[in-house]
Every structure is written in C-alpha cells, then in structure tokens.
Image (tube, helix red, strand yellow):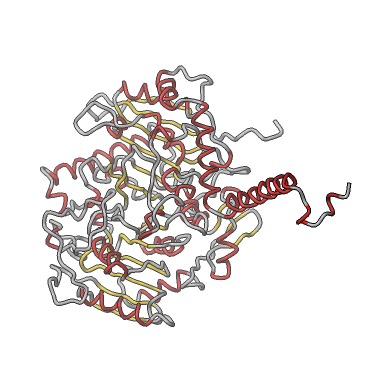
Amino acid sequence: MGHNNLPPSKRSPRQWRLLDLVTAFLFGIVILFFLLVLTPLGDSLAASGRQSLLLSSSDHARLVVAVESGKLHPHHIEPCPADYVDHMPCEDPRRFSQLSREMNFYRERHCPLSEESSLCLIPPPDGYKIPVQWPESLDKIWHSNMPHNKIADRKGHQGWMKSEGPYFVFPGGGTMFPDGAGHYIEKLKQYIPITGGTLRTALDMGCGVASFGGSLLAEGILTMSFAPRDSHKSQIYFALERGIPAFVAMLGTRRLPFPAFSFDFIHCSRCLIPFTAYNATYFIEVDRLLRPGGYLVISGPPVQWPKQDKEWADLQAVARALCYDLIAVDGNTVIWKKPVGDSCLPNQNEFGFELCDESDDPSSAWYFKLKKCVTGASFVRGDSAIGASTKWPERLTNAPARAALLKNGIDLFVADTFRWERRIAYYKTSLNLKLGTSSVRNVMDMNALFGGFAAALSSDSVWVMNVVPARKPLTLDIIYDRGLIGVYHDWCEPFSTYPRTYDFIHVAGIESLTKYTGSSKSRCSLVDLMVEMDRILRPEGTVVVRDSPEVIDRIDRIAHAVRWSTSIHGQEPESHGREKILVANKILWRLPSASN
C-alpha cells in the first residue's frame, strides 16, 4: 500500500517495465489513429481492405465463367458496397498516395489489373432520381444525385453553382467570369469568330462545372471540357449530369487522348496549367492539339497577374517562339492565333524548340509520353487549317481531307455516312428507341470509326462521345475534322468518367473490342466490359449492341447478370450480313436499407 505515491526513484524495476509497456501501447494507438485519419495511408489501407474483402468473397475468373455460362448463383452479379457510388477504377484517389507527384503523374490514369478489379455493380446513391432532362438540366440538377457540396460552398460566390431546395442550380459563372459565361463569351467575340460556323470544336482545360462549354453550345460550338478528379469533388460529374460534354483527364506526363490538330479553339480560364514549365512541354501539347489558324485563349494567372511578371513574360516568349499572332490582351485574358502553314521553326528561340522527327506520329496519343518537340503542319497529312475545310454544318457530311489518306477512304466515308442514316431511321421507327426524345442527352458510341452514328443524330438534342479504340485504325482525326468530338480508349480498361453519366450507349462489333488485332484470342472478358458499361450507364438508360447472332446470345446472358432487361431484333432490311441487334434497358435498383 502506498506504492503509487512513491517518487519515481523509489519504484521497482518491475513497475517501470509495466508502466513503460502501457504508455508505449497507448502512445502507439494515438500515433496509428493520426496516421489513419490524417494521412493518405488510411485511405490506402481502407481501399486495400475493401478490395481484399470483395476479392476474397469470389474468385474473379470463376465469376466470369459463371456469368458467361449462365450458371451464376444468385442470378445477378452482386452490388458493390455503398461507398462505391462514385467509384472510378482508373482515377481512384486511394491509389494516388503510392505514385510519383512529378508532373502530376499521380493524377493521371492508373488502372488496376482486371483480376484485381471488383466484379460488382455500382449502386446509385441514396435518394437517386432519374436526372432532370435537357435543356432544363443545363441550369439545375437533383441534389440527391450528386450529394457533394464542396464546390457550392467554396465557389458559390463566383457563380459556379448553388444549393436551392432539392436542386443544385448553375448561374453560369466561373472564377474568371463571375457574372456568367455569356458575358465573357460576348467579350471574346470582339476578337474571335465565335459565330458563323468557322469554329466548331473547342477544348476547355480545367473546366470547373463546364459552364463555358455549356454556353458555347448556343453558338454552335461543341466543347470537350476536361478536368482531373481533384479536391473540389466531381467537377466533371456535375458537368455530365448537366448534359454538357466532359471527360476526366489530367495534363501530366502523357499526351491527352486526342489526335493532332483536333480543336479550332482551346481555352483555359484559371486552369492553373504551368504552360512554361518543363521547357514549355504543356504549351507544346496544346500546340499539337490546336489546328493551324486556331485560337488559344488563356484567362487568369499569369496573364497580367500581380507578382507573376516573370511567368507572364515567359508565357509570351513561348508564344513568340512558336510564331503565334498576339490578337489581344484584355485585362487578365490573352488571345493568340496559331500560324497557318508550316511552323516557323527552326529559329533562334531561347527555348531550343525543334520540330519533331517525321517518323513521329503526332496523332498517337494513348499512353503516349509527352514530347518536347513541335509538330509541324506538314507532318499531319491533309490540310487541317482553319478555313481549309467548309464551315459548320457543311463540314459534318463533306469528306475531310484526312479521310482521303486511307485506302478508298472517301468511298468508305460516304458509305458509312449513308449506312448510319439508314440505321438510325430504323432504330427510331422500328425499334422504338428513345433517340430524339428528351430522355436521351448524353450518348456514347464505343466503336465510332468515322463518327457516322453521331452524324446521323446531329438533328437531335444530344451530344455523342465518339470513342475510337486505341488498337484499331486511328480515325479520330476524321471525326474531329467533320466537327464532332471524341477520345481514344482501350475497352479492356475502365473509361475515364464517373458512374451513371450516359443515357444511351451504342456499340457495333462489341467482341472485337476485347480481341487482339487480327486474332480470335481475347485480351479481356466481355463480362468485365459489360460491368463497366453498366457503371457508366444511367438507370433507365439504354444499350444497343450489334454483332453476330452467336455474340448476341452471349451478350444476352451477361446482360441478365447485370440486371438489364433485353430484347433481340433483326437488322435493317437493306443491310447485308448476319448481324443481330440487342436492345437492353438498365433498371433502377437500390441497395437494401440497413433496417431490412
């Protein structure tokens, strides 16, 4: 008795050991708590644990076989956990902490192997509703579909978006245009031919909730808006829910997944891309994407920005070295025009810019490292300069110069255009698809070739993401030349978008997307592909698949496993071959509540 009040010098060695052990244990618990809560380690461990839990419950390969054979028990693929509602397999923040931050490498695409992926169906969030239809969705969306308040809280005063009752509303503002994108566009019209059809395709870098691209739709300009998955939470998610073309991407160590000379107009409004860093590598990438004679607009830092005199001077020096014409500097906005014709390089510029080697294909852009050389206009065969082609909308149906570079390219282009006009008419009249109604806004063509499917829908109030498979002929440049938009992608990997972002998905020749070129051997499974299609399809959305009867039978079995209702139809009377058409509709299902 009384030992607890002894001074430290009088305590026994045994008491010291016990106290030390208890103290060390408690201290370790505190340190571990802070590591898990306040550092990326906790997210990484949580992700690993969650992934292990899903994978340990069923072997991926065995599940695929069971689904394809129709012997899956229960009959549906299991739902993912509730915290998967916003899951993007290739842009998972929980993987970021393990990757290099040099040139934002960690924020680019990093996909898990298929056998590491969870074969489960992404659930909708609690309270999910069928999205507000276009064009009302441009101005408001359901809050319950996008329960992320961070942008509204941080950017509401700049007119990005606000929470009002059951909706998020979008006044149309941005950091550099808080009074609305419409007023900002009117200012740009003083310097750029925004109206009249000269400009059609635009790229908005670091787009926020894409109000700029949404406002340009009224001018007949189709804008591909992109931003990374970042701390603002779901910029691109909001854009797509609004019905505005958008895509998750990061300008880091690789080329953006677009061909050379795609865009008539490239825009950055406080996108914070360090254009002059790494010897102006990012400016050179923008130059690769911009058509000769096209316009580059940068608004915000460093343009006449306080304490950024050197950065502003460097940016002007890069533009001069590439012989861009300075059109105007209006406040914090600069507008340049890219020269038409061959590059002015080589010249005595301070950056040491040189033309790329002629062996370099400037339109190769799938997992292609950024280059520090400049693409000369003569390296891209076919005249791609602004003004060389007809204006919009005539350019939609006129065969582009780059089509002529393919064997029988002009004939193939014309035939493809007429084929899809006939097919779309059949879809609407005989299959009673929702195309042309207010139920369909965001559309994807997974195997686009020349964009004939999208061209046939040009009179509808839709936009189409034309996807050209990276292992097939790279015809995406032709799609851009005709005034449409799209990306390169390999369908053995997940797509860079959020869940529930497309109303209608179309794919002709689905099995070819999973095969090695010129081979019957599979690179990946149709089951994984269709689970990915389900991830990006909105509830009550539609999928149309065209393929051989044998493939359609397989697709039908898998479709029931992903909870789609299906019907199978014959092809158009005028068509040749053995194709069948599967039409599938995704039902709105929900996770059982915790009380059930």
Q: x, y (%) of residue 328?
A: 31, 80
Say which of 95 and 502 sits in front.
95
Q: x, y (%) of residue 151?
A: 55, 61
The residue lying furthest to the right in this view is 1
Residue 578 visible (yes or no): yes
Which residue occupies 50% across, 57% down?
Answer: 138
Above-or-below relation of 567 to 407: above
Say which of 330 and 221 sits in front.
330
Q: How many marks?
A: 0
Please state, as top left, top right, bottom left or bottom right, where the C terminus lies in the image.
Answer: top right
Residue 247 visible (yes or no): no
Q: x, y (%) of residue 292?
A: 20, 66
Which residue occupies 37% across, 74% down?
Answer: 188
Picture quadrant where residue 595 is located: top right
Q: x, y (%) of residue 465?
A: 35, 48
The reply, left or right, for residue 260 in relation to residue 545 is left
Above-or-below relation of 579 to 445: above
Say which of 589 and 419 sits in front.
589
The reply, left or right, for residue 330 in relation to residue 548 is right
Picture quadrant where residue 417 is located: top left
The reply, left or right, for residue 130 in relation to residue 498 is right
Which residue occupies 29% across, 25% down?
Answer: 548
Picture quadrant where residue 225 is located: bottom left
